[in-house]
Amino acid sequence: MSSEPDTAIRARGLGKTYLLRGGNGRSTTLGEAVSRFAIGRKRGAIREFAALEDVSFDIRQGEAFGIVGRNGAGKSTLLKILGRISRPSRGRVEIWGRVGSLLEVGAGFHPELTGRENIFLNGAMLGMTRREIQGKFDSIVDFSETGEFLDTPVKRYSSGMYVRLAFAVAAHLEPDILLVDEVLAVGDAQFQKKCLGKMREVSRNDGRTVLFVSHNMGAVTALTSRSIFLDSGRVAAIGPTPEVVRAYLARQAETPMEWSAREKSAHPVQILSLRMLDREGNVAGEFEAADGFTVELGYEVRNPARNTLVEFFIHTADGVHLVTCGDHDADPERYALRQPGEYVARVTLPGNLLNVGAYILRINSGTHHATYDHEDALWFRIAESSRLTSRHNRRGLVLPMLPWITEHRP
Amino acid sequence: MTTPSTPATASRRRTVIEPPRAWEGLGLRACAEHRDLLGAFAMRDIRLRYRQTALGIAWVVLQPLLGAGLFAFVFGKVARLGSHGVPYFVFSFAGLLGWTLFANVIAKAGSVMIQNAGVITKIYFPRILLPLSAMLSSLVDFAIGLGVMAILLVTAHIGVAPRILLFPVWIAMLLVLALGCGLIAGALGVKYRDVPYITPVLLQFLIYGSPVGYGMMDVPARLQHWLWLNPVSAPLEACRWSLLGIGELNARALGYSAIIAVAVLGIGAWLFNWLESSFADVI
């Protein structure tokens, strides 16, 4: 097998297919499987879902490489394959060097164990020997700024401390290749900056390879030189990061303005359609910041359903969860019991709420224990055409118009 | 690989990731790289157990003592079985010692995958380390039980004889069988969520079909053949023989148990290996 001498990762024709068994065709208990076998009942229709399809790329050693795409585009699946957590269905990856993955901050931390104990446990999980961890222990503690709480169970840590400690352990693994997934979505801004700095240092100064998945285009642009844009499991663009980010943003703009369910599910409740209306009642994908917009959800209840949620979330393009809103807000009885039938629920969000930018409308239905629908259904933009000059280009997630009272004493 | 231009490349190990095959190999290299993780998992298990329960380490001592007391009452006092020259309590404790190890390994190895679902979907390591660590932490409990046994041997004026030297052999047989069963239960448990609940129930039944609370010689001759078919019988009986000098060293039954144990371990390793590549996707 020949290779470029400085290749870190080479992927060829990578594909991952999940088998989804429709309806009640899936045995999740041995009892079910045995009775199914005994009765000879056929399994439900098996549906294939391609999470990744024919993905090929090369990453050089020491390169900082970004992976962008919407939720469900296959980014996490790709990282899981590269991190040897999940196996591909097709294709092949060759990796030169030790891989360290940070797919979720604090995965492998046990809440009952102390910070010190978790450093050793987590370090061992990430592939460090006890001796290695001992050698880096002080440096890990320094970086995480949790020194005085080392012998406190981490369940008493604040989420910020938890994240700092977890990142510190992973960052000190000193792998040849570091895989990082959305880690920066948590933690305070100052620590995010520190993490980014550490990753930059790892890739530029130490010549290590960094793969970075993020919704935050700013962070991807700042950190990586080349990127891949995944769309529905396929490579939509690959190349220098600024070009890939442009392609990603352009794709967002051309997304459809209406969404409908691809097929009927077997759940008691299913969201069938979603659209957004402007002030005049026209279907639209871009709204005036001062005007607000209406979200219209169509859903079907098949059996009397108790304690069910039918709701939508609004996320920013960077992945910040801004709003959760369901049609039982106005009528708690509807949460308690929904009678069979079709429903159309509308809610109008006021103007001067969301700031200018791109947003994701995610639908969600289910109970507090089970999820029926969960999908990034639509993208939309909030724009400002009238441009009240004084309010133009305001920073912040929300754009409230507040009743200022200003007294003037000449 | 062709001639690398930098020395760094030469030292960098090449990993190939491909779709799963029927047999993945034992993964000994990966296990060696993660060698310290086995101990770390076992330490976590032990720490948590002794930290979270109010009785802590006392519980590990109390559990077999209570069990032995119960057996001494039921079989010794109620059913009036002979205790063959030692207190019935000591007699049943000697039986429980090996049994508890056997049952703990299976129960823990059977549930350890599910308990670590969050780690399995986020971090790569050889999955086999989880059931192995379950075995390791069960051995710690066993060591404590062994200490209690030693105290009982002294206080009951029984002492030890050279036959004790064979004791590790019987324990090894039990461990091989238990690890095999544990691997099967653990691998199936990922896919079928009721397996971790069924396993302890099956073990509860099996304890009465094994010479734990009673001895083989207390069983009517016509039933003995059937009981020897239980692969746990011969090593458990042999454990008691090594500790107390009571019971039968049935060479044929021991040979049979050894063959079954190795076969079950083989099946367990194969099944675990086969399902391992899909753990992260189904768990």
Image (cartoon, coloured by chain):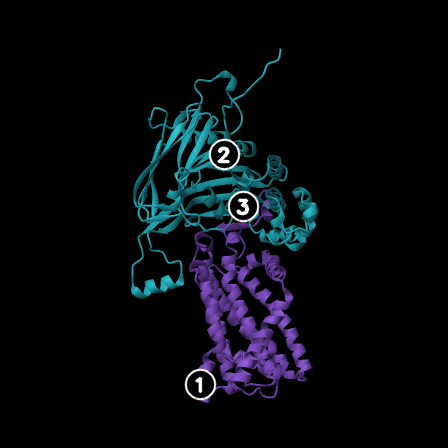
Label 3: few (<14), some (14–19) or many (≥20) C-alpha neighbours in 10 Å: some
Q: Could you tell me the amino acid type at mark 1?
A: Leu
Q: CA distance from mark 3 to mark 1?
A: 56 Å
Label 2: few (<14), some (14–19) or many (≥20) C-alpha neighbours in 10 Å: some
Q: Could you tell me the amino acid type at mark 3?
A: Glu
Q: Which SS class for mark 2?
A: loop
Q: Chain of mark 2?
A: A
Is residue B254 in view? yes
Q: Marks 3 and 1: which is nearer the front?
A: 1
Percent x, y of residue B15 = 52, 50
Percent x, y of residue A309 = 40, 43
Q: Chain of mark 3?
A: A
Q: Chain of mark 1?
A: B
Residue assigned mark 2: A318
The shade of chain A is: cyan
Q: Are marks 3 and 1 in contact (CB under 8 Å)?
A: no
| Chain identifier, purple in the render | B
Residue A36's place in the image compared with B6, above or below, is: below
Q: Looking at the image, which is closer to me, B103 or B121?
A: B103
Q: CA distance from mark 2 to mark 1?
A: 71 Å
Residue assigned mark 1: B223
Question: What residue lies at 43% left-to-right and 57% top-to-bottom?
Answer: B21
Q: Of the numbered discs in the image, which one, if any, rests on residue B43?
A: none
Residue A50's place in the image compared with A386, above or below, is: below
Q: Could you tell me the amino acid type at mark 2?
A: Asp
Residue assigned mark 3: A104
Question: What residue lies at 40% left-to-right and 37% top-to-bottom?
Answer: A330
